[in-house]
């Protein structure tokens, strides 16, 4: 692997980054009393993965974050691995009405078990349950981790349900009180991608746009075999009855939440306002996470994304869109309409920046170009290209990992343009590019590490001409 460039690109302006040390999976995402809480896997003493803690931050808009003291540290039961957090409004666990309860894996050599901690002051201080661990079967497999806990409203008056990653399956448990857990079922054998061990399940119920009703989505991160190489997040659409998940698709169907190289272990905020489901993921890949540029800190999250389901042929597809809160305070956008794009590249006049939100529509009717799109973070002979290959009917991202070896897998996804209009939304930040196509039906997420002088934006066409229907660009700067 080639040597990484300097991390002097600075911190992202719109994405959460660890204050110092190492960070990986988001944990314990929960909304409480006007705050979005974000816990995360954290090694405060090193830029490399090590004894895991839960770091902690809070925000009122998912854009500006207050860094808070470490919430959970290793103890006699082991390091603090991934998990989730819930608000125990019914005081089922007896820690106090409305207690914030964390359910997490503790890891020590040869053994993984699930434990509890609780907070009565909005997550500022934590106490571990004296009866830990609460789920530690003597015959548990070596990979027995990452509990995702939700409250399920059922005919029994409701109960807690847990999705747990166990080898290449997800095991489901139920509990009346977060302390005593009973195994109910297992899902995964023969389903989806198994290029690596299954990790970090997420279980959410999402609306189907255009109706009718809602469906359950089970998300499972896999440590290897994702479309861009290495780790990634797959999802299954189906039904959940509080104990069992039944997938709608045939077992060999594989659906990916993101086709870029850097989206892993996504988790949604419990109890988000307005009934919305909003998640984010770790913006990295286990193949090279320890080698990414670092300057006292290593680790950032994707942008938050609001979720829904949309009909896609005979099935349902996950839709991810940026919530309005992220850019609510930004100045009004600049607009470009009806531009002809000759073969080659043309800079957008007076458009530059390390943090940009670009919405663009290309009209392919009558276009002769074989490939077209945008280049961002242009400068010094380098750029990140976000393009569309018309003959191959594929969206692609190039140049996103110039610090990696030349044989890195391409970031590409088959995509058929609707109504001759190619619609893209691109979020550019100091060290990342996120591409959303077709109103959020396709996502490609990548880290990028250009220098601060690489800030231009270009339109391009190859093999012919193309036409820009419209483009708007926004930035935190006026």
Image (cartoon, rainbow, N blue to C red):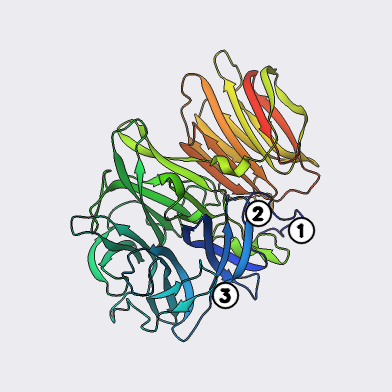
Position of residue 303 measured from the top left corner of the image (x, y, whole percent): 57, 48
Tell me the quarter of the image containing the N terminus: bottom right
Which residue is more in the foreground, 222 or 326?
A: 326
Position of residue 380 measured from the top left corner of the image (x, y, whole percent): 81, 42
Which residue is more in the foreground, 232 or 3?
A: 232
What residue sits right under mark 2 in the picture?
A: 404
What residue sits right under mark 3 in the picture?
A: 50
Residue 435 against residue 57 in the figure, above or below: above
Which residue is more in the foreground, 91 or 433?
A: 91
Tell me the quarter of the image containing the C terminus: top right
How far is disc 2 from disc 1 in space, using C-alphas?
Answer: 13 Å
**Label whose residue precedes the other's in the sequence (3 or 1):** 1
Position of residue 430 measured from the top left corner of the image (x, y, whole percent): 70, 49
Residue lying furthest left: 155
Which mark is nearer the camera, 2 or 1?
Answer: 1
Position of residue 52 measured from the top left corner of the image (x, y, whole percent): 53, 74
What residue sits right under mark 1 in the picture?
A: 6
Q: Secondary structure at mark 3?
A: loop
**Label whose residue precedes the other's in the sequence (2 or 1):** 1
Question: Residue placed at 29% from the left, 78% from the top?
Answer: 137
How packed mark 2 is, by other alpha carbons closer than 10 Å (few <14, some 14-19, many 20 or more), is some
Question: Residue placed at 24% from the left, 57% from the top?
Answer: 242
């Amino acid at each position: 692997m080639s040597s990484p460039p300097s991390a002097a690109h600075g911190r992202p302006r719109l994405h959460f980054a660890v204050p110092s040390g190492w960070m990986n999976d988001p944990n314990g995402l929960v909304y409480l009393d006007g705050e979005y809480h974000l816990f995360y896997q954290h090694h405060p003493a090193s830029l490399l993965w090590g004894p895991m803690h839960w770091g902690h931050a809070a925000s009122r808009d998912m854009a500006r974050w207050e860094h808070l003291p470490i919430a959970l540290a290793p103890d006699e039961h082991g390091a603090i691995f991934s998990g989730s957090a819930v608000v125990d409004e019914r005081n089922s666990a007896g820690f106090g009405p409305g207690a914030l309860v964390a359910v997490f894996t503790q890891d020590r050599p040869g053994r993984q078990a699930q434990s509890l901690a609780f907070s009565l002051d909005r997550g500022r201080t934590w106490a571990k349950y004296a009866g830990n661990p609460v789920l530690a079967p003597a015959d548990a497999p070596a990979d027995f981790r990452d509990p995702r806990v939700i409250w399920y409203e059922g005919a029994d008056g409701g109960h807690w349900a847990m999705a747990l990653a166990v080898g290449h399956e997800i095991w489901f448990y139920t509990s009346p009180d977060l302390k005593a857990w009973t195994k109910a079922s297992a899902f995964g054998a023969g389903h989806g991608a198994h290029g690596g061990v299954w990790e970090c399940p997420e279980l959410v119920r999402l609306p189907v746009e255009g109706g009718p009703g809602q469906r359950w989505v089970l998300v499972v991160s896999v440590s290897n075999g994702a479309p861009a190489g290495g780790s990634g997040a797959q999802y299954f659409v189906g039904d959940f009855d509080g104990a069992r998940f039944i997938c709608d698709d045939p077992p060999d169907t594989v659906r990916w939440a993101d086709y870029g190289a850097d989206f892993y272990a996504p988790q949604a905020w419990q109890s988000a306002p307005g009934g919305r489901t909003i998640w984010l993921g770790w913006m990295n890949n286990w193949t090279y996470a320890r080698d990414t540029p670092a300057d006292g800190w290593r680790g950032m999250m994707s942008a938050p994304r609001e979720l829904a389901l949309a009909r896609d042929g005979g099935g349902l597809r996950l839709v991810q869109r940026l919530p309005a809160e992220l850019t609510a305070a930004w100045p009004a956008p600049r607009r470009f309409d009806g531009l002809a794009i000759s073969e080659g590249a043309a800079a957008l006049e007076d458009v530059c920046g390390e943090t940009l939100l670009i919405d663009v529509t290309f009209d392919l009717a009558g276009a002769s170009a074989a490939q077209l799109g945008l280049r961002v973070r242009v400068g010094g002979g380098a750029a990140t290209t976000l393009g569309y290959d018309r003959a191959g009917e594929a969206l692609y991202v190039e140049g996103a990992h110039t610090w990696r070896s030349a044989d890195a897998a391409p970031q590409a996804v088959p995509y058929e343009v609707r109504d001759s209009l190619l619609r893209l939304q691109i979020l550019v930040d100091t060290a990342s590019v996120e591409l959303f196509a077709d109103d959020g039906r396709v996502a490609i997420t990548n880290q990028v590490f250009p220098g601060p002088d690489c800030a231009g934006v270009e339109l391009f066409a190859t093999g012919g001409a193309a036409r820009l229907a419209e483009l708007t660009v926004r930035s935190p700067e006026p």
